Image: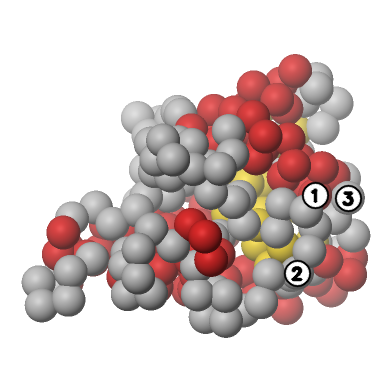
Amino acid sequence: MPTLFITGAAGGLGLEFVRQYREAGWTIIAPTRADMDVTDRNSIEAYVAKLGDVAVDVLINNAGMRNATPQASQLGAFTAEGWMPTLATNVIGPALVTQAVLPLVRRGAQKKIVLLSSRLGSLAAGGGGNSGGGASSYYAYRVSKTAVNQLGRCLAIDLGPEGFICALLDPGWVRTPMGGAQAALTPEESVAKMRKVIAGLEATDNGRFISLDGETVPW
């Protein structure tokens, strides 16, 4: 059966991904934060080294956070220290994890790399119904998701010639600790739709920003 490597699986969407893929018979590699710090290259590489010659079919960079501090969301209170946890987890983390896990995905049959983004990172869409307030809300989070879109595009350009498919997915507005109780989707609904999109990814989807319904999200 195929193998999934996923980050941030202790709760929310990550835990639901694990549940659904395991139910479908997949082998799951889901390091906890105690196993692997996604912002620490040494920690990531040490964990991956223990896996040996495993072949990974799908890598999902799911670990993420909203603004960790008020200093990351309130104009007039910004600090570098306030922004860094969000940027490190949401942007640097996927870059380091993808770099380290890449040899395993090269051995896999599907060669799919998925980065969870958000409509909040779309410059054109402006956040839509899940904006959580005005266009200027969630500064660090919005910036991080715009940056992760660029990361995905760069990976697609570099890895596409090898047959990889690198896609950005918008999970929608989901009832998780991050999304809040008023969100439109349950984790079960969101993940089921994302799994369908992931299963259908083809070479022409390399570098796309995709919604739950398989539609292109504007940059």
Q: Amino acid at mark 1?
A: Val
Residue contact at pointers 3 and 1, CB within 8 angstroms: yes
Q: Is residue 45 left or right of residue 203?
A: left
Instruction: Classify mark 2: residues with Cα within 10 Å, few (<14), some (14-19) or many (20+).
Output: some
Query: Residue 59 at what x, y percent from top left?
Result: 66, 46
Instruction: Classify mark 1: residues with Cα within 10 Å, few (<14), some (14-19) or many (20+).
Output: some
Given residues 86 and 160, the one toward you in this image is: 86
Q: Residue under circle 3?
A: 200
* Disc 1, SS: helix
Lower sequence index among marks 2 and 3: 3
Residue located 80% across and 49% down the image = 197
Looking at the image, the residue that sits furthest to the left is: 77
Residue located 10% across and 77% down the image = 76
Q: Residue under circle 1?
A: 197
Residue located 57% across and 81% down the image = 124
- Measure the C-alpha gap from mark 2 to mark 3: 14 Å
Residue contact at pointers 2 and 1, CB within 8 angstroms: no
Q: Is residue 181 left or right of residue 189?
A: left
Q: Quadrant of residue 48?
A: top right
- Measure the C-alpha gap from mark 2 to mark 1: 12 Å
Mark number displayed over residue 216: 2
Query: Residue 93 at what x, y percent from top left?
Result: 44, 56
Mark number displayed over residue 23: none
Instruction: Classify mark 3: residues with Cα within 10 Å, few (<14), some (14-19) or many (20+).
Output: few
Q: Is residue 188 left or right of residue 70?
A: right
* Disc 2, SS: loop
Residue 172 visible here:
yes
Residue contact at pointers 2 and 3, CB within 8 angstroms: no
Q: Amino acid at mark 2?
A: Thr
